[in-house]
Structures are given as structure tokens and as C-alpha cells.
Image (spheres, grey):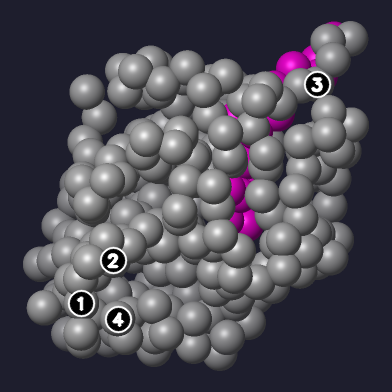
Amino acid sequence: MPLSIQVGPYTVIALTDGAGPFFSPRAEAFPDATAEQWSAADRFDPGALDADGRWWLQFRAFAIRSERGVTLVDAGIGPADSPAASWAPVPGALPAELAAAGIEPDEVESVVITHLHTDHVGWAVVGGKEGETSRPFFPNAQYLLQQAELDALEQINPPLRSSVIDPLRAAGRLRLVDGETALRGGERLIATPGHTPGHQSVLVESGRELLAVTGDLLVHAIQLLHPELAYAHEMDPHRAQASRERVLRARATRTLHLATPHLTEPFVVAGP
């Protein structure tokens, strides 16, 4: 059974699609980080550094289950022929992880795409090879994407228009949103731009507990410890920092859980 955490009536389940090294050295990814900051990050998340000194990433999606249904946040790296195949450790294991969690693809009511990078949309659409028709992997789900992300698609990853966006539209499964949006299950989408122009995160609340499914709001523990540090692949580092700090401010007054795609542990308590 995949790891999970309970926040009030919500069960948040970490679904690991794969793990592997990043395609460039971490010092290039965070050029402003100091030796002291790296040491602190390595103590916090020692599993993010492999035996050869490479940045080792997890690639995860998250399922949020409640009495009202199942929401999936992101769609992983995908099968062997997915858009992420040029750099990520495909094929991913998301279908098996869903099965282990007792979730069938047709049970998923909403798929939140945090942003249009290939390691977050891999299982969104399958098929389309050798005459096969492309189809949503989650046939009954609405796929939620910020309008600002779609507007910036030509800057982010133009091929995803034909491989992901067009098939979702053809199937009537793409839902565009603008800013904060409530989901049927009670979760909230919030705009967290910077990594990409329309990046979004998901909030789950119960009493004094708050869980944020971060997407790539932070991609390494060094940004949790030092949210001011820019990541080389953020399209707007200043907006990304502002988005990170806005979410992390909640830890001053509440217990803040982070559900992260790329840190070694899927759930991190960032609150008091």
C-alpha cells in the first residue's frame, strides 16, 4: 500500500511513478546555493543525493480520497513512449500504484495538472501510436488546468498541445480555471505562478491542519529551508519565490503538511 496521510476526512496518498537522477548537476540547478545551505539540505533530505553525488528525484502524483470521491494531482512521468521519455525513468508505475491504493482509473473525478512539464502529465493521455486513438487515461475525470498555463504553452512545451491538450479537448475533459477554485471534494486550487506562468497547487484543510500538494512550487529541500533560492528552471524566479513564501507562511499559525513530488519523503511537516 502506498504511503498516505490523514487530514480530517481526507486521505492523501503518495503514488510513486518512478525515481532517477536529474539531467544536470544540482549546483547548476541552484547556482546561488552556498556550501552551508547544501549541508543543511542534505541533513534534511539525505536521500536526494545518490552514491555518485547526483541529485536523485522521486516522481510522484498524489490521490486525495474523501467521501465525495477521488482527486488526482498530476499524472507522473508516464509510459515508455510518454513525452518525458527523453530524460525521465520511464515507464512509470502509476497504474500499479493506483491499483495498490484500491483506485481504478474510472473512479477518479478530477485530475489537477499543476503545470505543463512532461514529468507531471505522463499518464494524462495514452495511446496515439501506430494508428491508435489518443484517449484520457482517466476516462471520467475533468482535467483542471489554469488558463494562464495554457496561454503560455508555446513558451513552456509546444508539443504538449497535440499530445495532451488537444486529445483532452476532443474528449470534452479539459476544464480551464482562473485562480483559486473549489473542487467538488472540498479541496482548493490556488495559483502559485513562477515555476511556470500558470502553475497551481492544491490545498486540503481540516481544523488547524493544512496540507499543500505543491507541484514544483519547491523541487528540493533546499527551497523549503531557503525559499528565497531560485531554481534554474523557474520561468519567473521572483514570482516563484513569492508563491513559495505565501504558502509557507501558513506554518507560522497552523500545522502545514507538504506533499511533494520530488523530495525523498512524500510528506513533510513544515508547521510548528
Q: What residue type is labelled 1?
A: Arg
Q: Residues within 10 Å of mark 3 (few under 14, many from 20)?
A: some
Asked if the residue under mark 4 is in contact with the one under mark 2, i.e. CB atoms within 8 Å, the reply is: yes
Q: Distance between the residues labelled 4 and 3?
A: 41 Å
Residue 222 against residue 20 in the figure, above or below: below
Q: Which amino acid does label 2 sit on?
A: Leu
Q: Distance between the residues labelled 1 and 3?
A: 43 Å
Q: How far apart are marks 2 and 4 (CA)?
A: 8 Å
Foreground pick, 6 / 192: 6
Where is residue 48? Give x, y as percent: 25, 54
What residue does disc 2 label?
210
In front of the other: label 2 or label 3? Answer: 2
Please tell me whether mark 4 sits on a helix, a strand or a loop.
Answer: helix
Q: Which is the main secondary structure of the residues drawn in magenta?
A: loop
What residue does disc 3 label?
134
> Mark 4 or mark 2, which is nearer the start of the sequence?
2
Instruction: Name the outermost residue toward the top.
Output: 131
What residue does disc 4 label?
250
Asked if the residue under mark 3 is in contact with the one under mark 1, i.e. CB atoms within 8 Å, the reply is: no
What residue does disc 1 label?
254
Q: Which amino acid does label 3 sit on?
A: Ser
Q: Residue 187: within the magenta?
A: no
Residue at 77% x, 43% y is 174
Residue 142 against residue 188 in the figure, above or below: above
Quadrant the N terminus occupies:
top left
> Mark 3 or mark 1, which is nearer the start of the sequence?
3
Q: Residues within 10 Å of mark 2 (few under 14, many from 20)?
A: many
Please tell me whether mark 2 sits on a helix, a strand or a loop.
Answer: strand
Give the magenta part as a residue range. Answer: 112-130
Asked if the residue under mark 4 is in contact with the one under mark 1, i.e. CB atoms within 8 Å, the reply is: yes
Q: What residue type is labelled 4?
A: Ala
Foreground pick, 144 / 85: 144
